[in-house]
Image (spheres, rainbow, N blue to C red):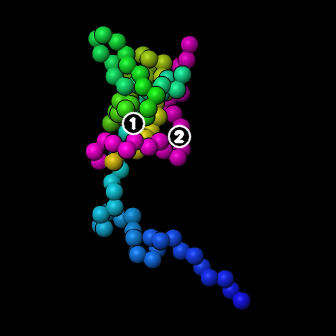
Amino acid sequence: MSLPVLLPSSALTGASLSPEVGAPSFLKRYVLRFRNGAFLHAYKDDGIYFVFDLQRACLFATPPSFVADIFHAEILIVLTDTSGRNVRRTLLDRPVTSGVYL
């Protein structure tokens, strides 16, 4: 006697992750994380602003290596939706650069 095969609900509806059927698009972005776990929110003439909420972190389209070196931070790769919201860390959450901590 064989057991029934349980399929995820998406298998029953024929859902697909291909762009042709309107699946969400994701953008690869970069954030800076500091040794205390805070993320860079903004840097201006009057100071540097930190947040612990990844959703409010400053997103960079290219790895901000120069800024990471100045602030002694590490660069993490994140994924966002096309609006720049719904920021998610990647599964392989490895820093792009190791960052130098003093």
Give whichever of discs 2 and 1 has the lower sequence position: 1
Q: In the displayed structure, would residue 71 be above or below residue 30?
A: above
Magenta stretch, main secondary structure class: loop
Element assignment for label 2: loop
Q: Is residue 9 visible?
A: yes
* Magenta-colored stretch includes residue 85: yes
Query: Residue 62: percent from the left, percent from the top?
Result: 35, 34
Query: Residue 85: percent from the left, percent from the top?
Result: 33, 42
Specify the quadrant that holds the N terminus.
Answer: bottom right
Q: Is residue 66 visible?
A: no
- Residue type beneath disc 1: Gln
Residue at the image position 29 percent from the left and 67 percent from the top: 20
Q: Name the residue under label 2.
A: 93
Q: Foreground: 48 or 28?
A: 48
Residue at the image position 30 percent from the left and 10 percent from the top: 46
Q: In the displayed structure, would residue 48 be above or below residue 79?
A: above
Q: Mark 1 points at which residue?
A: 55
Q: In the displayed structure, would residue 27 be above or below residue 4?
A: above
Q: Residue at the far right: name it.
A: 1
Query: Residue 91: percent from the left, percent from the top?
Result: 52, 46
Q: What stretch is highlighted in magenta?
A: 82-102
Query: Pointer 2: residues within 10 angstroms few (<14), some, or many (20+)?
Result: few
The alpha-carbon separation of the residues under discs 2 and 1 comes to 16 Å
Q: In the displayed structure, would residue 25 be above or below residue 100?
A: below
Query: Residue 22: percent from the left, percent from the top?
Result: 29, 63
Element assignment for label 1: helix
Query: Pointer 1: residues within 10 angstroms few (<14), some, or many (20+)?
Result: some
Specify the quadrant that holds the C terminus.
Answer: top right
- Residue type beneath disc 2: Asp
Quadrant housing residue 64: top left
Task: Tell whether label 1 touches label 2 (CB within 8 Å).
Answer: no
Q: Foreground: 50 or 71?
A: 50
